């Protein structure tokens, strides 16, 4: 009698696990989870009974403490709390996977040739320059002027997620175009962070980091493919970047371009060894009387087959495949929870879009940069590229549809909020906090409006084009 509820319970667990796996494979799944985390963070930061606990958790110290022979307490990393742990350590893993993705696309994907890459790369540059120019025109000479990099990024998860929801209303070529554009945009954003949002540079520590990087390049050149020979120097490079004044997340990008892409074993080696171990599996069938599979020798064969097949793929591909679920469904939601929690009442001192001669209007610069600057820059740069024959128009795509899709480029979110957390550090602490809070609110508002406007325009253009050609409206 008790077996029935136990069976129902285990079946329910299996069904839940099946639904979870099916949900995680949807291209819009990451965007949905990020959106939920944004809402949760806003509630936690503003509800009177959770606000204090929310900020208290983020400010909890997580540094390792050591006692020197003289009795002095030494903390490593210095000044590390939970919020900094997410932004400086976990986001390093995020930037590492972004770097792996960019490297893969540059080798085999949409950025692998000049012909393929030129159009989205030119469009990405336009999509960076126009928002930065709009922000600078609004905030030039004010305390907010250093935030010009905030509205320049596109969030690939949200943008591609919305395109997947819209389905066949958008030509496949434009989906590929926006994906490649977002990847190129990520590379530009990484360069912006590296060159414009670091601290004072300690050349000695940076020099040691460069020596380690050269050592890793030498190992790669000599054919070293074992992960630990790259993992340990990667931790050292992160620490050197952290204390050298270069933002520590850049170490993730550097390492992404250093790990080997070439596999440890060749295809011929894998086939020869594979046939040998499969033959041994059959030879070892009757080696144990109980006839269980796999028996001891067969387990050894299976382990060797697994090792050989694993090392027949390059380390870069293996790392990207294994880290992506953790980045998409753990690190990015944690980043949203830690950074999207803006106290709205604290902004009542300023009108959100009010301009001040001293402080400028960070909200107006970001909002207009994302909503207007991004689609304007992407569309104008694409038009110039096509007219100068520097790039090709995506197949089966009209200019109206390209402009509508370009509006989705204004969904900044992840990278925009990250740049916001690095901006305005040259101001007094209370001014820095206010500007960053207003910046986060503007990023959320601008990204939401860009997503809504882009989706509406895509539907309108699709209906107009379908009506003109007589095709059924989906």
Image (spheres, rainbow, N blue to C red):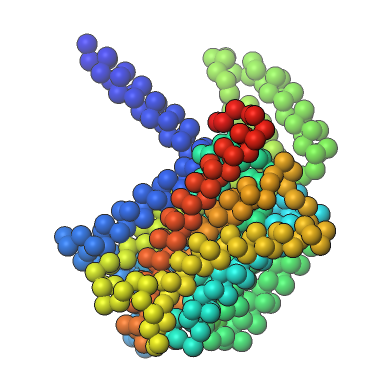
Residue 208, by quadrant, is bottom right
At 20% across and 60% down in the image, what residue appears? 47
Name the spot of residue 339 as percent of width and height, x first.
Answer: 38, 64
Q: Please name whichever residue, 387 or 374, is drawn nearer the observer in this view of the structure.
A: 387
- Between 347 and 203, the residue placed more toward the observer is 347
Tell me which residue sits at (54%, 53%) in the image: 408
Picture quadrant of residue 186: bottom right
**Viewer can see residue 468:** yes
* 45 in relation to 35, above or below: below
In-image side of 343 versus 355 (left or right): left
Compare residues 81 and 312 and report the one nearer the observer: 81
Rendered position, 138 above or below 405: below
Residue 232 coordinates in the image, percent (x, y): 59, 64
Outermost residue toward the left? 49
Quadrant where the N terminus sits is: top left
Whether residue 250 appears in this view of the structure is no
Q: Residue at x 37, y 72 (%)?
A: 353
Question: Where, quadrant-wise, is the C terminus in this rendering?
Answer: top right
Residue at the (79%, 59%) spot, across then down: 387
State whether residue 86 is above or below residue 392: below
Position of residue 445 in the picture relative to residue 192 (left or right): left
Image mark count: 0
- Give coordinates of residue 330: x percent, y percent: 43, 51
User: Residue 101: x percent and y percent?
Assistant: 64, 54
Position of residue 67 relative to residue 455, above or below, is: below
Residue sitting farthest toward the front = 468
**Front in this rendered view, residue 421 or 358:** 358
Residue 198 quadrant: bottom right
């Amino acid at each position: 009698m008790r077996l029935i509820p136990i069976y129902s319970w285990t079946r329910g667990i299996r069904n839940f696990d099946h639904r979870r796996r099916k949900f995680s494979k949807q291209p819009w799944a990451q965007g949905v989870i990020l959106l939920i985390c944004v809402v949760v963070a806003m509630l936690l930061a503003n509800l009177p009974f959770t606000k204090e606990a929310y900020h208290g958790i983020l400010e909890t110290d997580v540094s390792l403490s050591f006692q020197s022979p003289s009795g002095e307490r030494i903390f490593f990393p210095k000044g590390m709390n939970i919020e900094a742990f997410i932004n400086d350590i976990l986001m390093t893993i995020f930037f590492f996977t972004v770097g792996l993705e960019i490297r893969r696309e540059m080798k085999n994907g949409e950025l692998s040739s000049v012909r393929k890459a030129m159009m989205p790369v030119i469009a990405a540059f336009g999509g960076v320059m126009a928002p930065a120019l709009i922000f600078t025109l609004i905030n030039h000479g004010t305390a907010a002027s250093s935030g010009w990099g905030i509205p320049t990024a596109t969030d690939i998860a949200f943008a591609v997620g919305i395109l997947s929801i819209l389905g066949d209303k958008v030509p496949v070529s434009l989906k590929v175009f926006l994906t490649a554009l977002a990847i190129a945009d990520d590379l530009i954003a990484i360069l912006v962070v590296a060159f414009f949002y670091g601290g004072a540079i300690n050349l000695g520590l940076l020099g040691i980091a460069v020596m380690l990087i050269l050592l890793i390049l030498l190992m790669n050149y000599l054919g070293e493919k074992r992960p630990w020979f790259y993992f340990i120097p990667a931790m050292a490079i992160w620490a050197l970047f952290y204390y050298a004044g270069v933002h520590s997340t850049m170490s993730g990008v550097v390492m992404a371009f250093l790990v080997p892409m070439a596999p440890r074993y060749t295809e011929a080696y894998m086939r020869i060894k594979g046939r040998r171990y499969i033959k041994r599996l059959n030879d070892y069938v009757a080696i144990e009387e109980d006839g269980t599979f796999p028996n001891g020798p067969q387990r050894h064969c299976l382990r060797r087959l697994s090792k050989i097949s694993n090392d027949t793929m390059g380390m870069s591909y293996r790392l990207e495949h294994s880290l992506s679920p953790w980045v998409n469904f753990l690190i990015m939601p944690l980043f949203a929870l830690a950074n999207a929690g803006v106290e709205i009442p604290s902004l009542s001192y300023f009108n959100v879009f009010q301009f001040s001669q001293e402080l400028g209007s960070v909200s107006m610069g970001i909002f207009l940069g994302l909503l207007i600057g991004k689609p304007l820059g992407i569309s104008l740069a694409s038009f110039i590229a096509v007219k100068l024959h520097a790039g090709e128009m995506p197949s089966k795509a009209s200019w109206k549809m390209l402009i509508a899709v370009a509006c989705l480029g204004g969904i900044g979110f992840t990278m925009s909020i990250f740049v916001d957390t690095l901006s305005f550090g040259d101001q007094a602490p209370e001014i820095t906090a206010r500007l960053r809070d207003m910046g986060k609110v503007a990023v959320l508002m601008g990204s939401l409006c860009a997503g809504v406007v882009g989706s509406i325009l895509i539907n309108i253009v699709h209906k107009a084009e379908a009506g003109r050609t007589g095709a059924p409206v989906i």
